[in-house]
Image (cartoon, helix red, strand yellow):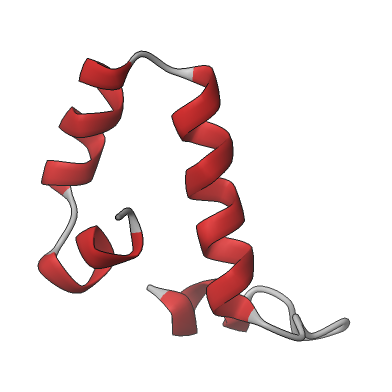
Amino acid sequence: MIERVASRFQKVPLEDPDRAVVAVIDLLRRHVSWGEFEQVKHAMRKPVQELWE
């Protein structure tokens, strides 16, 4: 997932794609209910789920 996100920023590459993904996850955490957040988390593959913790 990180590689996929990074590939979308070819003109202006992300300095730290991991940090960008974690920032988006944190934003989601603050704007959706805990139950919705957990549903989305569990729909992801294990390596991505680890970023959510």
In the displayed structure, does residue 45 sit left or right of residue 4?
left
Q: Residue furthest right?
A: 12
Q: Residue at x 45, y 32 (%)?
A: 29
In the displayed structure, does residue 34 sit left or right of residue 32?
left
- Nearest to the observer: residue 26 or residue 5: 26
Location of residue 14 with respect to 28 vertically, above or below? below
Q: Residue at x 22, y 43 (%)?
A: 41
- Nearest to the observer: residue 27 or residue 10: 27
Query: Quadrant of the image for the C terminus?
Result: bottom left
Location of residue 35 with respect to 24 vertically, above or below? above
Q: Residue furthest front?
A: 53
Q: Give the tally of numbered discs.
A: 0
In the displayed structure, does residue 13 sit left or right of residue 30?
right
Location of residue 38 with respect to 42 vertically, above or below? above
In the displayed structure, does residue 13 sit left or right of residue 2?
right
Location of residue 42 with respect to 16 vertically, above or below? above
Q: Position of residue 28 (x, y in %)?
A: 49, 33
Which quadrant of the view contains residue 35?
top left
Which quadrant of the view contains residue 36?
top left
Query: Quadrant of the image for the N terminus?
Result: bottom left
Which quadrant of the view contains residue 8?
bottom right
Q: Position of residue 31 (x, y in %)?
A: 53, 20
Q: Position of residue 27 (x, y in %)?
A: 58, 37
Q: Position of residue 16 (x, y in %)?
A: 67, 82
Q: Residue at x 29, y 20 (%)?
A: 34
